Amino acid sequence: MVGDIGSAAELVPAVAELVRRGVAEVRWFADPTGKAGTNVLEKHGIPYESRLPNGDDVFSLVLVGASVTACRYQKEWIYWGRSHGARTMMYEDLHTTGARPHVLGIDPHVMLVIDEEASRITNRTRPARTLEHVYVVGKPTFEDLPDMIAQRDTIRFRVRAELEVSPYDFLVVYWSAGEAPEQPRVHLDALRDLGIIDGRRVVFAPRLHPKLPDFHELWAHATTGSCATVDARHINNPPEHLSIAADLVVAAWQGTGGLRAALLGQHVAIPLFPDDTEKRIAAGHEQGLTPLLRAKAALPIVSAEQLPSVISRVITEGDALRAELCQKAIASFTCLLQPGAVKRIADAVARELG
């Protein structure tokens, strides 16, 4: 059962592996308020239903991809599983996806998480009385990063040429989150009017999450400021090629864009405005700092007014700063580059099926 795009993309290959092994017969369900059905399952040719459990259902195990926004169906399916003697599991596709206040009320028997940091957060935030096991399994969608790292220079040159961004331009890529729709507007207000900084022309490439309810309005807002702007929405195979082309990746704290870019060796900055410290704490982040910021693998931007000085620092310190950030990212998150996540997820599910 899936709702949001992220966890669905992770579970598709793992469930296919279970079917290949003959471990289980599978039926897919998708929350209609999310994009997992249309943007992931349909694109893979996977049939699915969008409904709540009914009296005719007979399942041995319920596997849910944790969703922050499309969360009603995952709650109902986990509750159904617990009340009907089925094993229940939830896969968390990013640190604290399963620790948000409205998701914490969903009580699976087992959590599957991406790394030891996620395991520590899960064990700290979830009630031990309901959670039996936490398995660290990794992220299938991160296994393509090492190949991109090896081709970094080639990818960077090709994408910048395609976007007509010169080597002298300073390209800022922005990845919004799909939640908190008021947040990207504030970020865009700061990003859309950048001009010349330290003699470099700033070029802005916005990437807005398709789940945002006012996507088209926000896109118009993003592309009508005074900053030179490029439309990079077509760079999707994979979209991380855009991050490689950037001089600075600005990423909302809720998404995977910043973490992927950091592991690709890019300069990454996380906006901490508008001030939502309490929300970050409630989401499971100690002192309101995400794992990237705690690891000092990304630069914080505490206000819109600070953004030009962050860009100036990246220009001034250049490769030395990038190497420092990359070293810290690899030290803290290199496990996410290890192959075999699909197998580890399938092994964990097969173990629960007995």
Image (cartoon, helix red, strand yellow):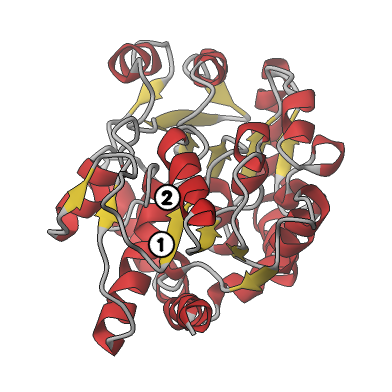
Residue with the most extreme bottom position: 21
Above or below, 304 against 329 in this view is above
Residue 119 position, x and y percent, is 72, 63
Q: Give the amino acid at mark 2.
A: Gly
- Snapshot quadrant of residue 336: bottom right
Residue 78 position, x and y percent, is 50, 50
Mark number displayed over residue 88: none
For disc 2, the neighbor class at 10 Å (few under 14, some 14 to 19, many from 20) is many
Residue 40 position, x and y percent, is 26, 51
For disc 1, the neighbor class at 10 Å (few under 14, some 14 to 19, many from 20) is many
Residue 140 position, x and y percent, is 44, 70
Front-most of 331 and 23?
A: 23
Front-most of 14 and 310?
A: 14
Front-most of 237 and 66?
A: 66
- Snapshot quadrant of residue 22: bottom left
User: Is 242 displayed left or right of 232 in the figure?
Assistant: right
Residue at image mark 1: 10
Above or below, 312 against 229 in this view is below
User: Is 14 displayed left or right of 183 in the figure?
Assistant: left
- Snapshot quadrant of residue 186: top right
Can residue 291 be spotted in the picture? yes
Front-most of 145 and 104?
A: 104
Residue at the spot x=31%, y=64% of the render?
12
Residue with the most extreme right position: 287
Secondary structure under tag 2 reads helix
Q: Give the amino acid at mark 1.
A: Glu
Above or below, 268 against 278 in this view is below
Residue at the spot x=49%, y=85% of the render?
354
Residue at image mark 2: 6
- Mark 1 near mark 2, Cβ–Cβ under 8 Å? yes
Can residue 168 be spotted in the picture? no
Q: CA distance from mark 1 to mark 2?
A: 7 Å
